[in-house]
Image (tube, rainbow, N blue to C red):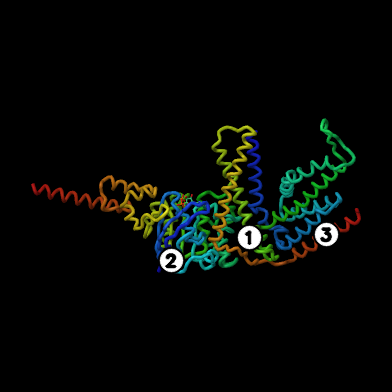
């Protein structure tokens, strides 16, 4: 089943600038989709369109087969189903306390008692219940990010739109977010994640590379086979992949150190057997 | 000098941000914090109307002490409260009160040499009364804000049938100001860290002007983002039903007390006419 279908979508900001042109994207239920591209490629704009915050200037967006319209913008069901993690946590946090802030969504959906309960659960899940009474203004960058993740989680959305979820986080918390995406995948939730983080890309079933429009669609492995795309997306190619390119191995691309080791061992074995056979021929 | 200007501005900003947004006192369990926000709001409106129409200095002084007592009963440090009230007064009234000392005709008290401007007794009295009245009205308002959480205030507006559009605008303005203050402070810190020496006074005013302009533009687009962030989380221009609001003993007492003050004001106005 298709969760999203974008048909020839274009978006022009009131300033006259086209952020997106001719975008065709499909998101299937339960898949994890990574969207990458250089700064200003229109990734955030794309997510806003998917979250019905912006309506496309041209083209059409279907959510679960139904067109997204002005009404979708304030549709409770839609808001309950889709959660959006904004790029900047400063935008997301605007209440007097962290708890109030996280409860903002759930209270709008389930009412006060149930909403507050769920907000507290979300804080606990992220291990930041200690921040509940703190003013979001005084939090550290990473704490803010975690609070805004809690805010999105608290409504238990089926579809998650994440705009750079691992930015601002230290290694431990980046791992936490990666695990979380992994878990959502396991639970059959649909995840669309904009990222510059290669470890997130590896988790994805499919990758879209954007630069005003879609310039590539395929699996992470297919993406890593094409250094020119990695460069175009301003991604920092992982060291192992660089190593493989330097060694002139193009047939296979490792997605982790373990895989790299496997490939190299196999490659070495092949080299030695072919060498010994040539020796015998002499 | 420029450094002084900037650090003053920063202090003002830090102070207001903390004062308005932390809700530190509003979350204490004092007398007014327990009162229903609707009753508090109606009392506030009544009393401010009463105060601005007062003419007698003793009556005004009496009305000035009432919020002090209530601040104490609401676990607010009275010195904090007084500071917060008078913090805003000079800017508010200086512009109006000071010129009027010289503009209102009457018995001269002193004359500023070389200018021929003379202060009149009537002008002085008026200025003192005016300032005191403003301070008193502001006291009630600040007492309200210090003891009421923002979301309770919004619930109160809703259940008093204030139109949804007004509430939405109020809500957005609150978020927006919060953001603006944050942004202004952050960028002040950022600018400070990139500035080697101190600028001269004129230069730093010019810089401040440019800086404010840029910040407003930034805050404007951020305001839009905040609106999107609210929409994304289920906000739909409608306000929440006010749940959990209940009129209790404290509220009746507060209402009665407000009425007594109102009666007192009417009576004294008649007596001192
Ligand atoms: N509110 C706006 N008004 C006008 N133009 C905008 C607005 N927001 C974004 N743009 C422009 O639209 C283009 C796409 O912006 P977008 O934020 O979608 O990029 P992005 O891919 O998310 O970039 P980044 O990686 O830096 O977050 C950019 O050229 C940007 O300058
Ligand atoms: Mg972006």
Question: Any atom of ligand 1 within 8 Å of the CB at mark 2?
Answer: no
Q: In the picture, residue B242 is in which quadrant?
A: bottom right
Q: Are marks 1 and 3 on the same chain?
A: yes
Q: Which mark is residue B273?
A: none
Q: Which mark is residue B262?
A: 3
Distance Cα–Cα, label 2 vs label 3: 62 Å
Q: Are marks 2 and 3 on the same chain?
A: no
Distance Cα–Cα, label 2 vs label 1: 32 Å
Q: Residues within 10 Å of mark 3 (few under 14, many from 20)?
A: some
In the figure, B2 relative to B239: above or below?
Answer: above
Q: Is residue B9 left or right of residue B218?
A: right
Residue at coordinates 65% horizontally, 42% vertically from top-left?
B11
What is the chain letter for disc 2? A
Q: Secondary structure at mark 2?
A: strand
Q: Secondary structure at mark 3?
A: helix
Q: Which mark is residue A3?
A: 2
Q: Are marks 2 and 1 in contact (CB under 8 Å)?
A: no
What is the chain letter for disc 1? B
Where does residue A5 sit, x and y in percent of width and height?
42, 64
Residue that sits furthest to the left in the current view: A282
Residue designated by label 1: B168
Distance Cα–Cα, label 1 vs label 3: 32 Å
Q: Is residue B268 left or right of residue A273?
A: right
What is the chain letter for disc 3? B
Residue at coordinates 53% horizontally, 49% vertically from top-left?
A140
Count of numbered labels shown in the rendering: 3
Is residue A165 shown to the viewer in this render?
Answer: no
- Whichever of labels 1 and 3 marks the residue nearer the N terminus, that label is 1
């Amino acid at each position: 089943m298709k969760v999203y279908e974008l048909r020839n979508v274009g978006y022009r900001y009131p300033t006259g600038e086209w952020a997106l042109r001719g975008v065709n994207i499909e998101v299937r239920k339960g898949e994890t989709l990574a969207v990458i591209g250089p700064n200003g490629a229109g990734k955030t704009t794309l997510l806003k369109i998917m979250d019905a915050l912006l309506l496309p200037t041209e083209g059409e967006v279907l959510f679960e087969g139904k067109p997204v319209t002005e009404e979708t913008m304030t549709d409770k069901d839609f808001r309950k189903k889709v959660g959006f993690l904004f790029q900047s946590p400063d935008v997301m946090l605007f209440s007097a306390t962290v708890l109030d802030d996280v409860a903002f969504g759930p209270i709008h959906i389930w009412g006060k008692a149930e909403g507050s309960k769920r907000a507290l659960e979300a804080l606990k899940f992220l291990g930041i219940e200690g921040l509940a009474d703190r003013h979001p203004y005084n939090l550290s960058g990473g704490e803010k990010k975690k609070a805004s993740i809690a805010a999105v989680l608290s409504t238990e959305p089926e579809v998650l739109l994440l705009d750079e979820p691992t930015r601002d986080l230290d290694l431990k918390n980046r791992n936490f977010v990666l695990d979380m995406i992994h878990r959502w995948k396991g639970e059959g939730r649909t995840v669309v994640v904009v990222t510059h983080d290669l470890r997130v890309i590896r988790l994805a079933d499919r990758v879209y590379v954007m630069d005003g429009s879609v310039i590539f669609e395929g699996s992470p492995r297919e993406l890593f086979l094409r250094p020119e795309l990695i460069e175009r997306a301003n991604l920092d190619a992982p060291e192992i992949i660089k190593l493989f390119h330097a060694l002139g191995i193009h047939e296979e691309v490792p997605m982790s150190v373990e895989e790299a080791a496997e490939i190299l061992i196999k490659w070495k074995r092949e080299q030695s057997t072919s060498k010994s056979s040539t020796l015998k021929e002499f | 000098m420029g450094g002084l200007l900037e650090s003053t501005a920063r202090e003002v900003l830090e102070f207001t941000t903390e004062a308005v947004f932390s809700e530190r006192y509003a979350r204490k369990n004092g007398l007014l914090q327990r009162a229903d926000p609707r009753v508090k709001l109606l009392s506030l409106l009544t009393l401010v109307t009463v105060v601005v129409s007062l003419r007698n200095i003793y009556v005004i002084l009496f009305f000035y002490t009432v919020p002090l007592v209530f601040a104490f009963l609401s676990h607010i440090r009275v010195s904090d409260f007084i500071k917060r009230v008078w913090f805003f007064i000079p800017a508010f009234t200086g512009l109006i009160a000071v010129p009027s000392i010289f503009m209102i005709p009457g018995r001269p008290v002193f004359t500023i040499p070389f200018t021929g401007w003379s202060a009149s007794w009537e002008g002085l009295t008026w200025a003192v009364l005016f300032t005191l009245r403003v301070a008193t009205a502001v006291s009630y308002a600040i007492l309200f804000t210090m003891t009421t959480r923002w979301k309770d205030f919004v619930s109160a507006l809703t259940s008093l049938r204030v139109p949804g559009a007004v509430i939405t605008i109020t809500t957005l303005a609150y978020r927006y100001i919060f953001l603006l203050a944050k942004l202004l402070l952050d960028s002040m810190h950022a600018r400070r860290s990139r500035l080697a020496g101190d600028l001269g006074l004129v230069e730093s005013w010019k810089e401040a002007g440019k800086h404010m302009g840029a910040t407003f533009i930034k805050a404007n687009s951020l305001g839009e983002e905040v609106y999107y962030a609210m929409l994304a989380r289920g906000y739909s221009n409608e306000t929440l039903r006010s749940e959990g609001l209940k009129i209790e003993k404290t509220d009746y007492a507060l209402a009665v007390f407000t009425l007594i003050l109102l009666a007192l004001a009417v009576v004294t106005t008649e007596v001192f006419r």
